[in-house]
């Protein structure tokens, strides 16, 4: 079946490992989705820069901008030179490189670097030409252009993600090369997020067919085939070398030689999953690229800033939300006689036990009825937690509190006391036994009101997936990551997905 996200043009001159001139290289394949997408980004960036100049022109008089007697020069600079300068600097900073488009923060980081370069360039040119530019005008134009460009690029990325999820357009088709367990692990990782645009279409085994005999696989399995001919057959544009397959002496280098001039991307997926980019560094030693993995940063200035932010935000939140808390308390008392709050022992930082604050959403005899529900095997969770979508122990007002996550607001008290954080793994019940093995690692940080588990599916996730996300957070924590999770929490709460 033809695939329309790339085009294949065979190189009539097979490579022999000798570098060829980039000027005489015959045919290069570029992803079809990338070319129109890049063109759209160029137009959006140009429009953003022009719009920023127009807004400043409308609200700031030319006399205040440094062009008192030369309005035609102002128009030339504001509407021609500056927008073109933005495009050139964005291109020079690699913000149109398809490796960074569609996923991750690198694209936006490069836009910010371009912004710094634009401001520095404008200042340097003004100094060299002795033009008395208004600092306010320079700041207004530059910051406005930056904001418009970031907003437009974020919007374009969301459209691309929707296209990838719904139609598969704008994606890369991958062949996974390695042993079957390694290839299946990479398959699971890259297919977790359809927005990433990576679609495995085949597995090429390095240890022969016998390794896959009797095992069901999500994509066809091949062995003993020429990789390039397999690429043509299945319509792939990316080869992912998995795990130990990349350790074969000289094989990876010869494969890279073989792919020269074909336009096929070669990526290496080492057996190092759930490690975020900032912790991984490549350090070449005598031609050997060593992958250096830094320890998780669970102390230092960033960690101190997180603790300070938690306490300040909790105090302000309790103060501002006090009318909401009072209204919820009244609603609970009117719905079911009993205490307003539910306090349960939970396991916190380094295994210390504390009592979590929550609004009560269940009838007062909920704990006594839990045993009978367990006997009926009604648990919708496959792990240590006990969850039922239509839990008969929850009264009607409590269901609305759970759907809107308002029942979690009293945990700001725990945050203020230092027992919890705004962002972190969810606190697990203390009466479910010891948490051993990988699960215990999540106790290295304080539990949070929200976390990666909550913004990725909440109660709809399996126990293993929830643990994986919590461990990923512990291993890759950063203050920026916390802010991103808090931002995603707003939309998850509004959608009410997975809340029960």
Image (cartoon, rainbow, N blue to C red):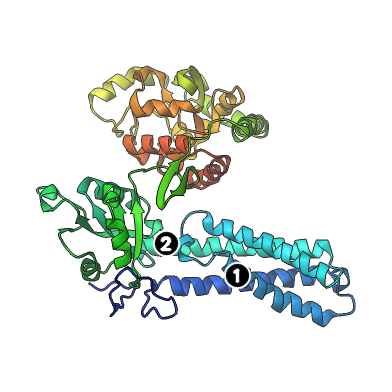
Whether pointer 1 and pointer 2 mark residues with C-beta atoms closer than 8 Å, the reply is no
Q: Residues within 10 Å of mark 2 (few under 14, many from 20)?
A: some
* Quarter of the figure that contains the C terminus: top left
Q: Position of residue 478 (x, y in %)?
A: 54, 40
Query: Image quarter for residue 320?
Result: top right
Residue 450, how many percent across, how many down? 50, 36
Furthest-bottom residue in this view: 72
Find disc 1 in the rendering and name its residue: 45
Quarter location, residue 87: bottom right
Identify the residue at horizontal 58%, vertical 27% (top origin): 415
- SS class, disc 2: helix
Dot 1 surroundings within 10 Å: few (below 14), some, or many (20 or more)?
A: many
Judged from the image, the secondary structure of the residue bearing numbered disc 1 is: helix
- Left or right, 141 with respect to 412, comes to right
Q: Does residue 367 appear left or right of residue 317 in this picture?
A: left
Residue 307 drawn at (x, y percent): 61, 30
Asked whether residue 337 appears in the rendered view, the answer is no
Res. 135 image quadrant: bottom right
**Circle 2 is placed at which residue position?**
162
């Amino acid at each position: 079946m033809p695939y329309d996200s790339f085009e294949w043009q065979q190189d009539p001159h097979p490579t022999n490992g000798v570098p060829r001139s980039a000027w005489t290289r015959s045919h290069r394949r570029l992803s079809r989705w990338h070319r129109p997408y890049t063109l759209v980004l160029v137009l959006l960036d140009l429009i953003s820069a022009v719009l920023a100049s127009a807004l400043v022109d409308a609200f700031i008089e030319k006399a205040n901008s440094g062009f008192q007697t030369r309005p035609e020069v102002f128009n030339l600079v504001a509407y021609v030179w500056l927008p073109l300068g933005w495009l050139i600097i964005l291109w020079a900073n690699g913000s149109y490189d398809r490796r960074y488009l569609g996923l991750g923060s690198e694209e936006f980081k490069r836009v910010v670097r371009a912004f710094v370069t634009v401001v520095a360039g404008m200042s340097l040119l003004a100094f060299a030409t002795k033009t008395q530019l208004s600092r306010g005008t320079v700041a207004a134009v530059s910051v406005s252009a930056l904001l418009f460009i970031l907003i437009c690029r974020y919007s374009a990325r969301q459209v691309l993600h929707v296209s990838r999820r719904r139609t598969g357009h704008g994606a890369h088709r991958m062949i996974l090369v390695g042993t079957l367990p390694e290839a299946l692990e990479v398959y699971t990782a890259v297919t977790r997020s359809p927005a990433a645009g990576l679609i495995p279409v085949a597995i090429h085994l390095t240890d022969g067919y016998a390794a896959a005999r009797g095992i069901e696989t999500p994509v066809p399995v091949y062995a003993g085939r020429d990789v390039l001919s397999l690429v043509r057959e299945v319509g792939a544009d990316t080869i992912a070398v998995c795990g130990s397959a990349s350790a074969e002496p000289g094989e990876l280098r010869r494969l890279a030689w073989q792919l020269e001039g074909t336009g096929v991307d070669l990526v290496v997926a080492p057996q190092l999953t759930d490690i975020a980019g900032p912790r991984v560094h490549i350090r070449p030693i005598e031609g050997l690229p060593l992958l250096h993995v830094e320890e998780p940063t669970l102390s230092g200035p960033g960690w101190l800033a997180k603790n300070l932010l938690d306490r300040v935000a909790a105090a302000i939140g309790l103060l501002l939300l006090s009318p909401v808390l009072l209204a919820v308390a009244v609603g609970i008392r009117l719905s079911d006689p009993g205490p307003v709050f539910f306090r349960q022992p939970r396991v916190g930082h380094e295994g210390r036990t504390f009592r979590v604050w929550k609004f009560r959403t269940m009838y007062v005899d909920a704990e006594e009825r839990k045993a009978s529900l367990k006997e009926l095997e009604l648990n919708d969770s496959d792990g240590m937690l006990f969850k039922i979508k239509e839990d008969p122990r929850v009264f009607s007002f409590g269901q609305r509190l759970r759907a809107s996550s308002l029942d979690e607001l009293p945990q700001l008290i725990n945050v203020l006391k230092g027992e919890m954080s705004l962002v972190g793994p969810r606190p697990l019940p203390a009466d479910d036994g010891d948490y051993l093995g990988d699960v215990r690692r999540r106790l290295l940080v304080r539990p949070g009101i929200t976390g990666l588990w909550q913004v990725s599916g909440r109660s709809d996730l399996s126990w293993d997936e929830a643990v994986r996300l919590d461990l990923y957070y512990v291993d890759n924590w950063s203050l920026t990551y916390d802010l991103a999770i808090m931002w995603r929490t707003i939309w998850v709460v509004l959608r009410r997905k997975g809340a029960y």
